[in-house]
Image (cartoon, coloured by chain):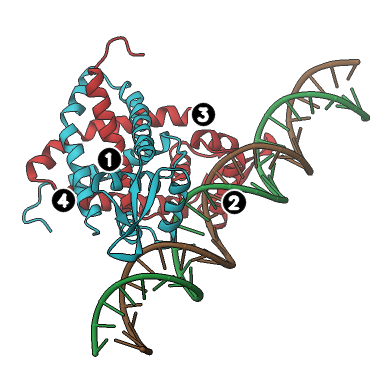
Chain colours: A cyan, B red, C green, D brown
Amino acid sequence: MTPRAALSSGDRDRLAGAIYALSATVLRRVPREVSLTAISTLATLERTGPRRITELAVVQGVSQPSMTSLVTTLERAGHVERRSDPADGRVALVCVTDSGRATLRERRRAGAQSVAELLDGLSAQEATGLLAALPLLERLRELDEQQRDAGS
Amino acid sequence: MTPRAALSSGDRDRLAGAIYALSATVLRRVPREVSLTAISTLATLERTGPRRITELAVVQGVSQPSMTSLVTTLERAGHVERRSDPADGRVALVCVTDSGRATLRERRRAGAQSVAELLDGLSAQEATGLLAALPLLERLRELDEQQRDAGS
DNA sequence: AACCTCTATATAGAGAGGCTATATAATTCC
DNA sequence: GGAATTATATAGCCTCTCTATATAGAGGTT
């Protein structure tokens, strides 16, 4: 894929495996009142502005009926609004509301809180070492985001 | 909690937030034929040997009826066996089978594969930097595991 | 030994979230 | 203007989770 390998095959697999395992661990720590897909959808709307249902379904990797149902649920909860597209009477433009943004913030706070408790188990030296990797962790997420939001 | 803070409050929150966000991102990349709880349960059984249903429910943070139902599903799929405890006729000792271990391996492989594709988007320098954090990522998972498996 | 209480698991029924198949309405293209 | 296409909605089903409750074995008391 890449011109030259950045990591040896073994390192690449070990690192990827560790990240996957940690991810599963972290997500299981946080109780979910709102589904992962719902949160991720709100995040997409916040980042990229109003989107159509079909686009959201593609971005989230769920079927269109599932996204219709999710949007209906979020709408009832007041987290999003359906607006009509003046240019095309078929489409529903989904917009996040202040309530939706607040939910997103709260969810991020709760998630970070849970991970922070895990971080407290590290020594000062370990914590500092991990902090050095922070930009790289953020970069990984950006990489995924770019691929994900491309579904326009 | 800890005697002295290893990180500033802001760093701690940013790092925790980044890890949580990345975790959610990573897990949404991997299609799930088997539920997260099922995989995590198989992993617990592999690590710690046969366990009672009630223990597994506590460790996974689900209700006992949910765990009974999950074990039944896993048993039908051949991934675990129910054995009786000679010392107590009420308990069902759940044991992972070879098929269960194979499922676990395959799932880890698929997860790592998906993350590896993300890693390929990093430059050689970034990838090497992240590799340096590998032991710390593993350590975080161990910390969680210790808390989790304690439910004996 | 009979009984009561506690514990381990199972069952029943309901709700959320996902899927496929299909219906409906608006747009686009001859 | 009518057919084909596209965007969303609806219907029906499956899985996973929950609470409430039933069943069966263990343990202690008299």
Which of disc 4 and disc 1 is earlier in sequence? 1
> Badge 2: how crowded within 10 Å, few (<14), some, or many (20+)?
some
Q: Which residue is mark 3?
A: B151
- The three-letter amino acid code for the residue at tag 2 is Thr
Between marks 1 and 2, how big is the CA–CA gap?
33 Å
Towards the viewer: B151 or B83? B151
Quarter of the image holding residue B66?
top right
The furthest residue to the top: B3
A43 sits left or right of B44 in the view: left
Task: Say yes or no: labels 3 and 4 on the same chain.
Answer: yes
Q: Is disc 1 in contact with disc 2, using a CB cutoff of under 8 Å?
A: no
The label shown at residue B72 is 2
Residue placed under numbered mark 4 in the picture: B120
- How far is mark 3 from mark 1, CA to CA? 28 Å
**Residue depicted at x 34% and y 52%:** A94
State the CA–CA distance, disc 1 to disc 4. 16 Å
Residues behind callouts 1 and 2 on a single chain: yes
Residue sitting at 46 percent across and 36 percent down? B48
